[in-house]
Image (cartoon, rainbow, N blue to C red):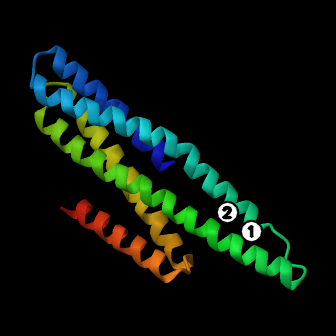
Amino acid sequence: MAALTAAASASLLMLVCRVTQRRGGGEHEFVGLLSRAEALRARLERMIDSDAQAFQNLMAVRRLPRRDPNETTTRRVALRQALSRATHSPLEIAAACADLVAIADRVEALATGEIESDARAARHLARAALLCSLDTVEQNLPHVTEPEQRSAMQRELSSLRSRLSS
Protein backbone atom coordinates (compact mmCIF):
# COMPACT_ATOMS: atom_id res chain seq x y z
CA MET A 1 0.00 0.00 0.00
CA ALA A 2 2.89 2.38 0.71
CA ALA A 3 4.27 2.09 -2.83
CA LEU A 4 0.82 2.80 -4.27
CA THR A 5 0.37 5.83 -2.01
CA ALA A 6 3.81 7.13 -2.93
CA ALA A 7 3.14 6.60 -6.65
CA ALA A 8 -0.04 8.68 -6.25
CA SER A 9 2.02 11.36 -4.51
CA ALA A 10 4.52 11.38 -7.39
CA SER A 11 1.68 11.74 -9.89
CA LEU A 12 0.27 14.68 -7.96
CA LEU A 13 3.72 16.30 -7.86
CA MET A 14 3.99 15.85 -11.62
CA LEU A 15 0.65 17.66 -12.01
CA VAL A 16 1.83 20.54 -9.83
CA CYS A 17 5.06 20.82 -11.82
CA ARG A 18 3.23 20.86 -15.16
CA VAL A 19 0.63 23.40 -14.05
CA THR A 20 3.29 25.67 -12.58
CA GLN A 21 5.39 25.39 -15.75
CA ARG A 22 2.38 26.39 -17.87
CA ARG A 23 1.89 29.41 -15.65
CA GLY A 24 5.48 30.40 -16.32
CA GLY A 25 6.88 29.85 -12.86
CA GLY A 26 10.35 28.47 -12.14
CA GLU A 27 10.43 26.64 -15.45
CA HIS A 28 14.02 25.39 -15.34
CA GLU A 29 13.84 23.97 -11.83
CA PHE A 30 10.42 22.42 -12.42
CA VAL A 31 11.76 20.52 -15.43
CA GLY A 32 14.24 18.74 -13.16
CA LEU A 33 11.69 18.18 -10.40
CA LEU A 34 9.18 16.82 -12.92
CA SER A 35 11.78 14.43 -14.32
CA ARG A 36 12.70 13.16 -10.86
CA ALA A 37 9.03 12.71 -9.89
CA GLU A 38 8.35 10.80 -13.13
CA ALA A 39 11.28 8.47 -12.52
CA LEU A 40 10.20 7.82 -8.93
CA ARG A 41 6.62 7.17 -9.97
CA ALA A 42 7.75 4.56 -12.50
CA ARG A 43 10.03 2.96 -9.90
CA LEU A 44 7.29 2.94 -7.27
CA GLU A 45 4.78 1.43 -9.69
CA ARG A 46 7.17 -1.48 -10.20
CA MET A 47 7.59 -1.79 -6.43
CA ILE A 48 3.83 -2.21 -5.93
CA ASP A 49 3.92 -5.63 -7.56
CA SER A 50 7.31 -6.54 -6.13
CA ASP A 51 6.18 -5.79 -2.58
CA ALA A 52 2.93 -7.72 -3.04
CA GLN A 53 4.92 -10.66 -4.41
CA ALA A 54 7.26 -10.61 -1.40
CA PHE A 55 4.28 -10.68 0.96
CA GLN A 56 2.52 -13.45 -0.96
CA ASN A 57 5.71 -15.49 -0.97
CA LEU A 58 6.08 -15.07 2.79
CA MET A 59 2.50 -16.25 3.35
CA ALA A 60 3.06 -19.28 1.09
CA VAL A 61 6.27 -20.20 2.91
CA ARG A 62 4.52 -20.00 6.29
CA ARG A 63 2.08 -22.64 5.02
CA LEU A 64 4.84 -25.11 4.12
CA PRO A 65 4.58 -28.41 5.98
CA ARG A 66 6.77 -29.40 8.94
CA ARG A 67 6.01 -33.09 9.18
CA ASP A 68 9.62 -34.26 9.32
CA PRO A 69 13.09 -32.79 9.92
CA ASN A 70 13.74 -32.38 6.20
CA GLU A 71 10.52 -30.35 5.68
CA THR A 72 11.26 -28.34 8.81
CA THR A 73 14.74 -27.45 7.53
CA THR A 74 13.42 -26.60 4.07
CA ARG A 75 10.72 -24.39 5.59
CA ARG A 76 13.21 -22.67 7.93
CA VAL A 77 15.55 -21.80 5.04
CA ALA A 78 12.68 -20.64 2.84
CA LEU A 79 11.22 -18.60 5.68
CA ARG A 80 14.56 -16.90 6.32
CA GLN A 81 14.76 -15.87 2.65
CA ALA A 82 11.11 -14.79 2.50
CA LEU A 83 11.43 -12.67 5.65
CA SER A 84 14.54 -11.06 4.29
CA ARG A 85 12.74 -10.11 1.07
CA ALA A 86 9.65 -8.98 2.99
CA THR A 87 11.89 -6.61 4.94
CA HIS A 88 14.04 -5.47 2.04
CA SER A 89 11.05 -4.56 -0.15
CA PRO A 90 9.58 -1.93 2.21
CA LEU A 91 13.10 -0.65 2.84
CA GLU A 92 13.46 0.03 -0.90
CA ILE A 93 10.04 1.68 -0.92
CA ALA A 94 11.02 3.83 2.06
CA ALA A 95 14.17 5.02 0.27
CA ALA A 96 12.11 6.04 -2.76
CA CYS A 97 9.60 7.76 -0.47
CA ALA A 98 12.35 9.71 1.27
CA ASP A 99 13.50 11.01 -2.13
CA LEU A 100 9.90 11.84 -2.96
CA VAL A 101 9.45 13.80 0.29
CA ALA A 102 12.51 15.89 -0.62
CA ILE A 103 11.07 16.62 -4.07
CA ALA A 104 7.68 17.44 -2.54
CA ASP A 105 9.29 19.86 -0.08
CA ARG A 106 10.91 21.75 -2.94
CA VAL A 107 7.82 21.71 -5.17
CA GLU A 108 5.71 23.00 -2.30
CA ALA A 109 8.21 25.80 -1.66
CA LEU A 110 8.08 26.88 -5.32
CA ALA A 111 4.36 26.42 -6.01
CA THR A 112 2.09 29.44 -5.87
CA GLY A 113 -1.64 29.98 -5.81
CA GLU A 114 -4.27 27.30 -5.48
CA ILE A 115 -1.87 24.59 -6.64
CA GLU A 116 0.03 24.91 -3.34
CA SER A 117 -2.57 22.73 -1.61
CA ASP A 118 -1.93 19.97 -4.17
CA ALA A 119 1.80 20.19 -3.50
CA ARG A 120 1.12 20.00 0.23
CA ALA A 121 -1.18 16.98 -0.26
CA ALA A 122 1.55 15.26 -2.29
CA ARG A 123 4.05 15.89 0.50
CA HIS A 124 1.64 14.47 3.10
CA LEU A 125 1.07 11.35 0.99
CA ALA A 126 4.80 10.83 0.45
CA ARG A 127 5.52 11.25 4.14
CA ALA A 128 2.72 8.86 5.13
CA ALA A 129 4.02 6.25 2.68
CA LEU A 130 7.52 6.68 4.11
CA LEU A 131 6.30 6.23 7.69
CA CYS A 132 4.28 3.13 6.77
CA SER A 133 7.27 1.58 5.00
CA LEU A 134 9.56 2.29 7.92
CA ASP A 135 7.04 0.79 10.34
CA THR A 136 6.90 -2.39 8.24
CA VAL A 137 10.68 -2.63 8.20
CA GLU A 138 10.81 -2.20 11.98
CA GLN A 139 8.17 -4.91 12.39
CA ASN A 140 10.01 -7.39 10.16
CA LEU A 141 13.62 -6.60 11.04
CA PRO A 142 13.80 -8.74 14.20
CA HIS A 143 12.98 -11.76 12.03
CA VAL A 144 15.99 -11.24 9.73
CA THR A 145 18.47 -13.71 11.17
CA GLU A 146 21.57 -13.07 9.04
CA PRO A 147 23.62 -10.67 11.22
CA GLU A 148 25.33 -8.77 8.37
CA GLN A 149 22.10 -8.34 6.44
CA ARG A 150 20.19 -7.29 9.53
CA SER A 151 22.89 -4.79 10.46
CA ALA A 152 22.89 -3.28 6.96
CA MET A 153 19.10 -2.99 7.02
CA GLN A 154 19.23 -1.42 10.47
CA ARG A 155 21.75 1.19 9.26
CA GLU A 156 19.54 2.00 6.26
CA LEU A 157 16.49 2.23 8.51
CA SER A 158 18.32 4.61 10.85
CA SER A 159 19.48 6.71 7.92
CA LEU A 160 15.94 6.97 6.56
CA ARG A 161 14.55 7.82 10.01
CA SER A 162 17.11 10.62 10.34
CA ARG A 163 16.13 11.99 6.91
CA LEU A 164 12.54 12.00 8.08
CA SER A 165 13.31 14.09 11.13
CA SER A 166 15.42 16.65 9.29
Task: Confirm or deny contact between disc 2 and disc 1 (CB under 8 A).
Answer: yes
**Which residue is the site of mark 1?**
62
Q: Position of residue 148 (x, y in %)?
A: 45, 79
Q: Position of residue 77 (x, y in %)?
A: 70, 75
Res. 155 image quadrant: bottom left
Seen from the viewer's position, the closer of residues 128 and 151 is 151
**Which residue is the site of mark 2?**
58
Res. 131 image quadrant: bottom left
Q: How busy is the neighbourhood of tag 1: few (under 14 within 10 Å), some, or many (20 plus)?
A: some
Name which residue lies at 34% across and 46% down: 126
Res. 75 image quadrant: bottom right
Is 113 placed above or below 139 here?
above
Q: Position of residue 124 (x, y in %)?
A: 31, 45
Name which residue lies at 23% across and 42% down: 103
Name which residue lies at 14% across and 15% down: 23
Q: Amino acid at mark 2?
A: Leu
Secondary structure at badge 2 equals helix
Tell me: 142 left or right of 27.
Answer: right
